[in-house]
Image (cartoon, helix red, strand yellow):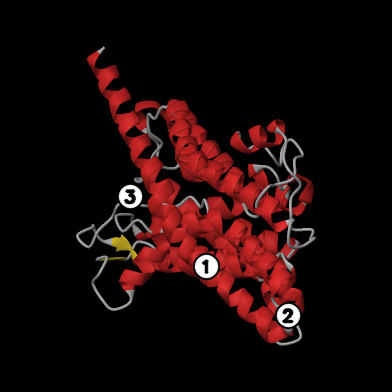
């Protein structure tokens, strides 16, 4: 899941201390998203439902709310990256947005091509709504520009919408940081960015998020994303208690009002994650400081790759079990477990073979461009 995810390519045992809670939340949310798509797409879940109806129904209906975890974490990390002290800075918004695009889209498009190939192969073994028809060049171009939802094209892979929304949200915040920096000038007023973010949260939660017609645009999701930003600002240990109390009030007031007016479970979950990040989000630990953290950090590192590649993997395994395995609940439940495990393995391979090399190429190109600019 192209979550606004902060990763260090090629991190090893000597890597700096990491955000332990964020890594754990990313791992849990990513696994829930894979399981949700397994329950929602493909015939295996339909055949296995009599064996575990409550579990599959819950995964189908509620596991998707794990997206809120990624939205809040995304806001938390974008604040850490673009204005860690809470003050708007002098950033180059176009260059900043371009770097984000270049980081997200190359591995995303590789995964989209894998999904197209998987759909072509799956049609040989089954007929199902989860199989996308062959795309034309305009549909592929819309995905490459992260505009497939805005332009009305069907997504070629589950979760493609989230990559587009993540990019939109990042671009919005980058522009806000730049604009607030221009307005505040040398004074760098500390109150300006939190005030703008809370205004965005309020507008999102009280209007845009209540209208599903906006669900292809950043304002629909800015409430959750902005809560993550505010969690970063409020958790700054250098702030005075009064400032922290004010920031917490700025988090709670619009969110609670929105929930009273129109209760949405997804917003309640976003608020809960925000509170957890406010209390513990900055806690760090060494990558291998205690038992279990090695696996958690590794799974968090590959979470975006797993999010990208799991759909074609699950589609192919669904098709194979539909064609070659009897439609009995136990066999099909085993197929779901196989697809889940294969998604994790495929995510690790995709990270090592696609995301990591493409990230290194981008880093080299960026370094070379910066060197040329400095020379000129």
Seen from the viewer's position, the closer of residues 290 and 182 is 290
Label 2: element kind: loop
Q: Nearer the viewer, residue 338 or 210?
A: 338
Query: Element type at marker 3?
Result: loop
Indicate which disc, 1 or 3, sits on the residue closer to the N terminus.
3
Q: In which image quadrant can residue 268 be found?
A: bottom right
Q: Quadrant of the C terminus?
A: top left
Closer to the observer: label 2 or label 1? 2
Tell me which label, 2 or 1, sits earlier in the chain: 2
What crowding class fits label 3: few (fewer than 14 Cα within 10 Å), some (14-19), or many (20 or more)? some
CA distance for labels 2 and 1: 20 Å
Q: Which residue is mark 3?
A: 9
Tell me, for residue 326, which label it has, or none. Answer: 2
Residue 46 visible in the displayed image? yes
For the question of whether residue 229 can be seen, the reply is no
Mark 1 Cα shell of 10 Å, populated few (<14), some (14-19), many (≥20): some
- At numbered mark 1, what does the secondary structure look like: helix, strand or loop? helix
Q: How far across and down, in percent of the image, does residue 279 sit?
A: 41, 67
Residue that carries the numbered disc 1 in the rendered image: 342
Residue in the image at 39% along x and 68% along y: 21
């Amino acid at each position: 899941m192209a979550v606004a995810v902060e990763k260090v390519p090629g991190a090893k045992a000597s890597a700096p201390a990491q955000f332990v809670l964020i890594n754990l939340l990313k791992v849990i949310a990513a696994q829930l998203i894979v399981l949700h798509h397994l329950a929602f797409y493909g015939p295996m879940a339909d055949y296995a439902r009599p064996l575990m109806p409550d579990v599959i129904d819950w995964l189908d209906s509620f596991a998707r709310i794990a997206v809120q975890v990624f939205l809040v974490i995304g806001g938390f990390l974008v604040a850490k990256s673009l204005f860690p002290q809470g003050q708007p800075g002098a950033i180059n918004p176009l260059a900043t947005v371009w770097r984000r695009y270049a980081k997200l889209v190359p591995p995303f498009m590789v995964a989209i091509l894998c999904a197209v190939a998987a759909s072509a192969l799956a049609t040989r073994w089954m007929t199902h709504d989860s199989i996308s028809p062959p795309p034309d060049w305009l549909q592929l171009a819309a995905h490459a520009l992260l505009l497939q939802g805005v332009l009305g094209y069907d997504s070629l892979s589950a979760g493609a919408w989230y990559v587009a929304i993540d990019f939109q949200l990042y671009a919005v915040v980058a522009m806000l940081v730049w604009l607030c920096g221009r307005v505040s000038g040398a004074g760098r007023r500390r109150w300006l960015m939190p005030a703008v973010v809370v205004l965005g949260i309020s507008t999102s939660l009280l209007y845009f998020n209540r209208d599903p017609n906006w669900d292809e645009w950043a304002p629909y999701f800015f409430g959750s994303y902005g809560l993550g930003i505010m969690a970063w600002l409020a958790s700054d240990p250098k702030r005075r208690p009064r400032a922290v109390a004010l920031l917490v009030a700025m988090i709670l007031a619009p969110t609670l009002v929105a929930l009273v007016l129109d209760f949405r479970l997804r917003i309640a979950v976003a608020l809960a994650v925000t509170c957890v990040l406010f209390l513990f989000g900055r806690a760090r630990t060494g990558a291998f400081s205690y038992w279990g953290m090695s696996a958690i950090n590794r799974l968090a590192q590959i979470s975006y790759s797993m999010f990208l590649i799991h759909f074609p993997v699950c589609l192919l395994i669904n098709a194979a079990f539909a064609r070659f395995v009897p439609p009995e609940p136990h066999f099909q439940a085993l197929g779901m477990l196989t697809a889940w495990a294969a998604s994790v393995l495929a995510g690790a391979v995709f990270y090592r073979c696609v995301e990591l090399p493409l990230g290194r190429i981008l880093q080299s190109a960026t370094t070379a461009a910066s060197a040329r600019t400095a020379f000129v």
